[in-house]
Each structure stands twice: as structure tokens, then as C-alpha cells.
Image (tube, coloured by chain):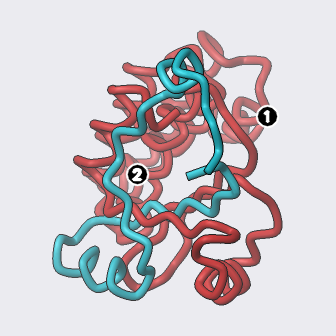
Amino acid sequence: LLFVPAKEVSAMPQELIHWSHDYDATSADAARQKKPLLVDFSAAPM
Amino acid sequence: VYSDRAVADFVQHHFVPVRLHVKDDSEQFQRVGGKFNAQWTPTILIVDPDGAERHRIEGFLPAPDFASQLALGLAKSAFARSDFQEAARAFDEVLQKHPDSEAAPEAQYWAGVARYKASGDAGALGETAKRFKDRYADTSWAKKASVWG
């Protein structure tokens, strides 16, 4: 386990997006909702 | 940027978000990233449900700039599906909400094109060229619009 000091935890920004991680399912969902997809290719710590 | 409330609200309201992480979603990252030729992270795409890419953001942007690019991409998506009235409205919204952003002059250009496409009235292009004389005159978009005025 990694030890993360409390002050660093409190400083980490809280993401507010509810991400899917399934591109095909998201495409189908986007078609149903008639909305574009926002596809984020990321290497940031999750 | 996804911790910014305005960005998060805009994303949740207008898009269906999917994140593909280079390690945690490696199979999909390779497959979908290859399809869209994503060669760097972060790369953010606005993609229509039929799989057509409409807008691309490569590299980090601060929240206000990122928000303006999302709004621009949303307007481009409406334009691409030939919903020109909605596109004109959405490009105008970029100008109203993000007037000092790099997205603004591009939005001003495409707002004019969308109005022309919606109405068939070439006056919309001439009006746009005039607007570029008042604002964003030193941008490449002003040069592109200069043939209309």
C-alpha cells in the first residue's frame, strides 16, 4: 500500500465526472441519448 | 479540469463521457486510440454517436480554456449534422461565454457560416466579415473571413 499524507489527499482535486470505461457501450448510450461522446484518452493517476 | 464545477456540469449535460486509461483500460486504449490516431495524452475527442470525430483537444488546458473548447466542439457537432440554426446558436454561445478565449474567433467565423447555411443569405457572411473588423481582427479567422467583406 502506498502511504499518502493526509494533507496531500485533501489537496487532490475531486473529479466530478461520472466516467464510463466501455467505449462500445458508451457509443450505444450516446446514440440513445442523441448526444456526442466525450472521449478522454488519459494517463493521469486514477 | 474535471474538478471544475462548470466544466463537470457542461460535460454531464451535453456529452456522454468515456475515459480510456493507458494502463487501466489498455486493450480499449490501444483499439480505440488506434482508430482515432490518439498519439499523446491527454487527448480529448468529441465524437458523434456514429463514430465521426468532430473536435480534438491535445494536451492539458486550464479549466476556462478547456470549457471554451468543449463549447466549440459541441457547436461543431451540431454543424456537422446540418442543424445549422442550433450550430449558430451554439457558436454564439461560445462568443458570449468565452469572448476572450482562443475558441472565440473560430466560433465567430463558423457562426457566420452556420447562419448562411441556415438562411441561404450571403449577407450573413458579409456581416461576419464586418464583425472581424471590430474584434479578433489579428487572427487567422479574420483573414479567412476577409473574402466575404
Q: Is residue B146 left or right of residue B66?
A: right
Q: Chain of mark 2?
A: B
Task: State the cyan chain.
Answer: A
Q: Which residue is tagged 1?
A: B140
User: Percent position (x, y) of residue B43?
Assistant: 68, 57
Q: Is residue A2 left or right of residue B111?
A: right
Q: Which residue is tagged 2?
A: B74
In the rendering, which numbered label is found on residue B69?
Answer: none
Which of these two is toward me, B119 or B58? B58
Task: State the red chain.
Answer: B
Q: Which mark is first along the chain, 2 or 1?
A: 2
Q: Are marks 1 and 2 on the same chain?
A: yes
Q: Give the mark toward the camera: 1 or 2.
A: 2
- For the question of whether residue B129 can be seen, the reply is no
Mark 2: which amino acid? Leu
Which of these two is toward me, B14 or B86? B14
Residue drawn 24% across the image and 78% down it: A29
User: Percent position (x, y) of residue B29?
Assistant: 65, 78
Question: Which type of secondary structure does the marked residue at label 2 adopt?
Answer: helix
